[in-house]
Amino acid sequence: MSQERQWVEALAVPARRVEAMRALIGGVNARELRSVEVSDASLHALIDGLSHHNPQVRWWCVQLLDHCSDSRAIEAVVPMLDDPVPRVRRNAAHALSCTTCKPAWSGEIPGAVVRRLEAMMHSDPNRKVRDEARHALSVCAP
């Protein structure tokens, strides 16, 4: 297992999370996270972490990918809109619409993602997910 994948596993352990975040993307606070440069190895490990069995790891992978302007990261987050855990879906909707977290990103998302967010806004069983989808649609650029 690569070092980056080990750091993704460490996201499940609260006592190791800050260290894992620094190792994977080089920052933990908002200022640091808005200027991160993610290595290919870390990017691939975080993308792989989106399918982790532990929802905390999936949530943290979305959270960290939210600060990555790379189109591969943005594309990888899209399927998380269908995660079985509401908190992960909500974070994915945020990540697909937040240019504050990714200042170098245009904010453009494909029409299929807009339609998925529209469906979530009306039919997701979780109110917070519906609210986040609504907010995402109000700020994203289709």
Image (cartoon, rainbow, N blue to C red):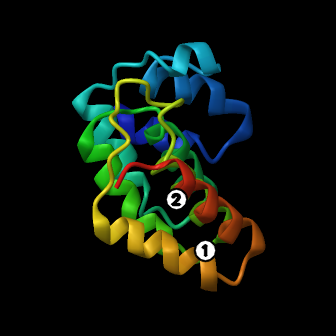
On screen, 63 above or below 110?
above
Q: Position of residue 112 (x, y in %)?
A: 31, 71
Q: Residue 29: horizontal and vertical position, in percent?
A: 64, 19
Residue at 36%, 32% in the rendered image: 3
What numbered label is drawn on residue 29?
A: none
- 116 over 25 or under it: above or below: below
Amino acid type at image mark 2: Leu
Residue at 37% x, 66% y is: 113
**Residue 96 image point, x, y percent:** 45, 51
The amino acid type found where label 1 is placed reads Met
Residue at the disc numbered 1: 121
Instruction: Classify residue 114 as left or right of residue 127.
Output: left
Can you say which quadrant of the picture contains the C terminus? bottom left
Q: Are marks 1 and 2 in contact (CB under 8 Å)?
A: yes
Label at residue 137: 2
Q: 109 or 37: nearer the eye?
A: 109
Instruction: Say which of 141 and 50 sits in front.
Output: 141
Name the residue located 52 percent from the left edge and 31 percent from the top edge.
101
63 to the left or right of 114: right
Q: Is residue 1 at all visible to an observer of this figure?
A: no
Query: What residue is shown at x 67% (from left), y 71% (from top)?
Result: 130
Q: Is residue 37 left or right of residue 27?
A: left
